[in-house]
Image (tube, rainbow, N blue to C red):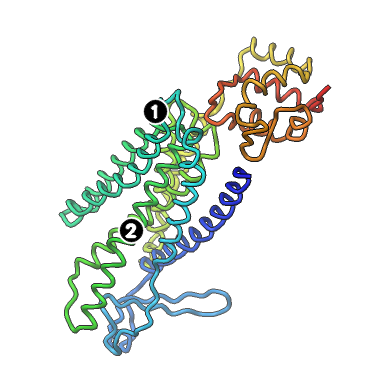
Amino acid sequence: MEAYLLDWANLLLRWAHVITAIAWIGSSFYFVLLDNSLSKPQEQDLKDKGVDGEMWAVHGGGFYHSNKYMVAPRWKPLPENLHWSFWESYSTWLTGFALFTVLYLFNAGSFLVDKSVYDWSPAMAIAASLGFLVAFWVIYDVICRAFGQRKNGDLIVGVLVFAFVVLAAWLACQLFAGRAAFLLVGAMLATTMSANVFFWIIPGQRTVIADLRAGRNPDPVHGQRGKQRSVHNTYFTLPVIVAMLSNHYGWLYHGPHNWLVLVLLMLAGALIRHSFVARHKAHVLGKRAPWEHAVIGTAVLVAMAAWLAPKPPTAAELAAAKAAAAKPAGYAEVRAIVDQRCVLCHNAQVQQKNVALDTKELLKQHAQQVYQQASVLKLMPLNNATQITDAERDVIKRWYEAGASIQ
C-alpha cells in the first residue's frame, strides 16, 4: 500500500510541477521577448506619458499594444492592483522539491546511491544532495554580487558561473548515481532561478515601488540587479529542462564521461536559447536573425549523437548473436536471471512500482514491462545495482519476443 500511495504522490506532484513550470517558463519567455522587442515610441503623447518602449502584437484575432515605463508613468500614479509574476516560480520550486523528496530522498538508498560510483550511506547522500542546492546558490550569488557591477561584469559572471556549473556537474557524477546526478544538477540550477526571484527580483521591485509611492527617487541598482538575474534565469531555462528530461535516458548517464554529456547538453540548450533571445532584438533593429548560436548548439547535439552511438558489433559478436537468436530463450533461463537480478526489489514484500515478479504468473503478467525496462530501455535494475549483464538482457529479449512462455 505504501508503494501505491507513493506512486499517486509521484503522479500528482509531477503533474502539478509540469503545470506550474509551463506557467513560469511561458511567463519568463514572454517578458524576455517583450523586453527585446520594444522600440522607442514615436507618438508625442506616449513620450509625454513617460513610455520608454512599445510593442505592437497580433494574436488570436486581436491587436495588443504593450508599453514599458522604465521608472513610472508620468500621467498617473502607480495603480494599487499590480500584477506580480512570482507565484509561478515559487510553485514550480515547491512542487519540484516535493517530487524530489518523494522519489529520490525517500528512496535514497536506491535512487541517490550507486555503490559502484561512491559508497556511502543514504543519510550522507541526502545531506550532500541538499547541500548541492544550497551551496550552488550561495556561491553563484557571491559571484554575481562581487563581479556583476564591474566593467564587463556580465562576461565575467557568465564565465565564472559556467565554470562552476561544469565543476558541479563533474562532482555530482562522482558522488551520486548517474540518473540522480543529472536531475540534481537541474534542480540546483532551478533552485538558483527561484532564489533569484525570491531574494532579489521581487524584493527589488517592492523597494522601487515603495520609493515611487513615497516620492523618493529609486536606486537604479535594484532594476539593474533584477534585470541581470532575470537574464540569467532565461539562459538557465533550457539547461534545466534538458537536465530534468535526460535522466530518463540511461544511455546518457551510464557512461564513464556522463558529466561531460550533461555539460554539453546544457551548453547546447543555452546556445539555442541565446539565438532566440538575440533574434527578438535583431528583429526590432532590422538586422538578420543571429541563428549561428543555435547552429552551433545543434552541431553540439549532432556530435554528441555520433560520440555516444553504440559501436558496431564485431564479426564474432554478430555470429554469436545470430546463433543466440536461432535458439529462443526458455522460462528456466529467464527465471534464473529474474530471481538473481530483479526479485530483490519485486517480490511479495517489496513491490517497487507495484510490480512483483516472484511467481511465474506475475512474471507473465509483467513480461512486457520487464522486456521494456531491462532489454529495450536498459533502465532496470536501477543503477544496475544487481549487475545484470548485456547477455542476460538479451536472454530476456529473446524470451519475450518468442512469446514469453512460462512453461
Name which quarter of the figure residue 222 lies in: bottom left
Q: CA distance from mark 1 to mark 2?
A: 38 Å
Residue 373 at x, y percent in the picture: 64, 33
Image quadrant in which the C terminus is located: top right
The residue carrying mark 2 is 231
Identify the amino acid type marked 1. Trp
Relative side of 401 to 338, left or right: right
Residue 159: percent from left, percent from top? 26, 44
- Callout 1: helix, strand or loop? loop
According to the image, label 1 marks what residue? 120
Callout 2 secondary element: helix
Amino acid at the residue labelled 2: Val
The percent coordinates of residue 322 (x first, y second) are 73, 15
Q: Is residue 344 above or below residue 166?
A: above
Residue under the image location 67 percent in, 20 percent down: 337
Residue at (38, 29) in percent of width and height: 174
* Disc 1 + disc 2, Cβ < 8 Å: no
Instruction: Determine which quarter of the picture holds residue 55.
Output: bottom left
**Visible in this render: residue 293?**
no
Front residue of 150 and 48: 150
Q: Residues within 10 Å of mark 2 (few under 14, many from 20)?
A: some
* Residue located farthest toward the top when viewing the structure as drawn: 316
Q: Position of residue 287 (x, y in %)?
A: 38, 61
